[in-house]
Image (cartoon, helix red, strand yellow):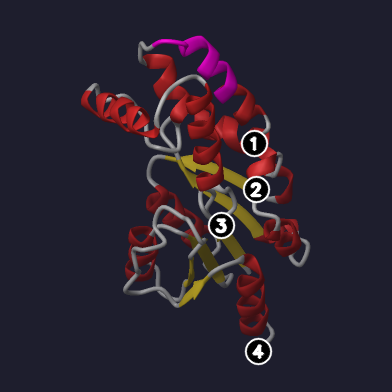
């Protein structure tokens, strides 16, 4: 058995991070609307950024109090461990490290830093940060073809592609309360779950048959 798990909005509470970032922007005299304007400018400049990579954005844009805000962002990410969903730890305690693989999307070193500062890498046999999650998942699928493969992730498009391309894979779409993709449904997922307690129950029931 191999359990492949996504990071953002599955293990890592992205909403909580963004809320902290917005709170810090407000303390520096900015409004939430101004953050959205900064975001739009970043997209126009084609900065390697999504809403989960705010520090990279702020470092590349010019605005008042930049250094102060960036310092706050860096401090937040240094303490990324506090954004890990608590049920993750209870989940991994029920499985062997050799059966756990972390698979995260990311284009910059920031994603790797976020994972590193979260201090969860030691719970996994392997950790992958890639621009093409499905391609990497296919390689994992082929490498462990004799094992039953479970895939836990929040992004519906990745879940659907996994189901189309990998026969026998068991997919569990994570539906965190304020996740980015919570309102987007997957047409092919085997299970929709709200937490790792549900994931544990499903995996144990399927592997004990």
Front-lying residue, 185 or 62: 62
Residue 56: mark in rendering: none
Query: What secondary structure is found at the residue carrying circle 2?
Result: loop
- Magenta segment range? 64-73
Residue to which mark 4 is pinned:
209
Tag 3 residue: 5
Q: Locate residue 87, reporting x and y percent.
A: 69, 60
Q: How far, Cα to Cα, is label 3 from label 1?
A: 18 Å
The verdict on residue 69 being magenta is yes
Give the image location of residue 187, x and y in percent.
Answer: 31, 73
Q: Is residue 47 left or right of residue 152?
A: left
Counting residues from the start of the chain, the first of labels 3 and 2 encountered is: 3
Residues at marks 1 and 4, CA–CA distance in whole angstroms: 38 Å
Nearest-to-viewer mark from 2 and 4: 2
Seen in the picture, residue 70 relative to 50 is either above or below; the reply is above
Please report contact status of discs 2 and 1: CB closer than 8 Å, yes or no.
Answer: yes
Of callouts 2 and 4, the N-terminal one: 2
Task: Please identify the quarter of the rendering in which residue 168 is found.
Answer: bottom left
Q: How crowded is mark 3: few (under 14 residues within 10 Å), some or many (20 or more)?
A: many
Note whether residue 109 is visible. no
Q: Which residue does the numbered mark 2 point to in the structure image? A: 84
- Left or right, 206 with respect to 38, comes to right
Q: Main secondary structure of the magenta part?
A: helix
**Residue to which mark 1 is pinned:** 80
**Residues at marks 2 and 4, CA–CA distance in whole angstroms:** 31 Å
Mark 4 and mark 1 in contact (Cβ < 8 Å)? no
């Amino acid at each position: 058995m191999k359990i492949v798990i996504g990071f953002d909005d599955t293990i890592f509470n992205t909403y909580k991070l963004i809320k902290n970032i917005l709170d810090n922007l407000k303390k520096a005299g900015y409004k939430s609307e101004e953050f959205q304007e900064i975001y739009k400018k970043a997209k126009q400049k084609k900065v390697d950024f999504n809403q989960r990579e705010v520090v990279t954005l702020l470092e590349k844009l010019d605005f008042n109090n930049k250094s102060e805000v960036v310092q706050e962002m860096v401090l937040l990410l240094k303490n990324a461990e506090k954004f890990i969903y608590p049920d993750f730890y209870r989940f991994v305690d029920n499985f062997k490290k050799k059966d756990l693989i972390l698979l995260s999307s990311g284009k910059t070193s920031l994603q790797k830093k976020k994972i590193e500062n979260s201090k969860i890498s030691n719970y996994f046999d392997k950790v992958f940060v890639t621009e093409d999650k499905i391609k990497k998942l296919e390689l994992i699928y082929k490498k462990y073809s004799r094992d039953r493969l479970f895939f836990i992730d929040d992004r519906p498009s990745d879940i659907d592609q996994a189901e189309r391309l990998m026969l026998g894979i068991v997919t569990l779409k994570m539906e965190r309360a304020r996740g980015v993709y919570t309102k987007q449904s997957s047409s092919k997922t085997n299970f929709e779950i709200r937490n790792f307690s549900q994931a544990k129950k499903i995996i144990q029931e399927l592997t004990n048959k």
